[in-house]
Image (cartoon, helix red, strand yellow):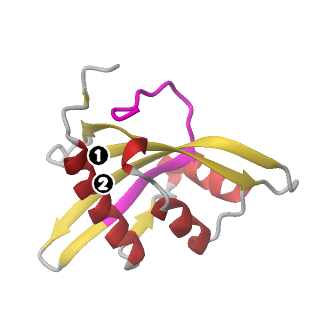
């Protein structure tokens, strides 16, 4: 595992982080990144025809045991942010109506503002690299 990945968390700490993420998702205070740097997210959403509602349902099903690690945001100007990575197993149907069970890689950025928290889902796609779970 990379030296930049942090797994120094208790289940209670991750439960609190996940609760905050899912409260934002539940309240519509989240965005799934789909810009030019997130082509993998766009392709995944298209391949499985993931409507906003389906994306929300998938994000709400993530559990504490799906937590992998956190890492420091390395983008200039955002070094103070901590990103949280989860990998859950889900079943989806693609456009060919083929059922697939896959590992869904999700990376979250929680942004705390004076008006409340928001979440940016930086990654939402099939896992493409090895991962280590903290609680499995």
Question: Residue under circle 2?
Answer: 109
* Position in image of residue 33 (x %, y %): 46, 58
Residue at (20% x, 40% y) in the render: 10
Whether residue 56 sits left or right of residue 50 in the image: it is left
Whether residue 57 is situated above or below residue 7 in the rendered picture: below
Specify start and end residues of the magenta stretch as a single range.
119-136
Residue 10 visible in the snapshot: yes
Task: State if disc 1 and disc 2 touch (CB < 8 Å).
Answer: yes
Q: Is residue 133 magenta?
A: yes
* Marks 2 and 1, the one that precedes in the sequence: 1
Q: Nearer the viewer, residue 58 or 4?
A: 58
Q: Is residue 34 magenta?
A: no
Q: Residue at x 57, y 46 (%)?
A: 125
Measure the C-alpha gap from mark 2 to mark 1.
Answer: 5 Å
Compared to 100, does 115 lie above or below? below
Q: Split into 4 quadrants, where in the image is the N terminus?
A: top left
The residue under the point 23% across, 62% down is 111
* Residue at numbered disc 1: 83
Q: Residue at x 75, y 45 (%)?
A: 100
44 displayed left or right of 130: right
Q: Secondary structure at mark 1?
A: strand
């Amino acid at each position: 595992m990379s030296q930049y990945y942090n797994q120094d968390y208790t289940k209670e700490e991750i439960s609190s982080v996940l609760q905050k993420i899912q409260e934002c998702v539940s309240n519509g205070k989240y965005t799934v990144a789909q810009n030019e740097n997130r082509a993998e997210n766009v392709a995944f959403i298209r391949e499985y025809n993931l409507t906003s509602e389906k994306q929300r349902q998938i994000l709400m099903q993530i559990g504490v045991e799906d937590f992998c690690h956190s890492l420091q945001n390395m983008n200039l100007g955002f070094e103070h942010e901590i990103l949280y990575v989860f990998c859950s197993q889900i079943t989806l149907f693609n456009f060919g109506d083929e059922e697939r069970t896959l590992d869904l890689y999700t990376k979250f950025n929680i942004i705390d503002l004076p008006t409340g928290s928001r979440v940016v889902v930086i990654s939402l796609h099939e896992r493409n690299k090895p991962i280590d779970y903290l609680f499995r």
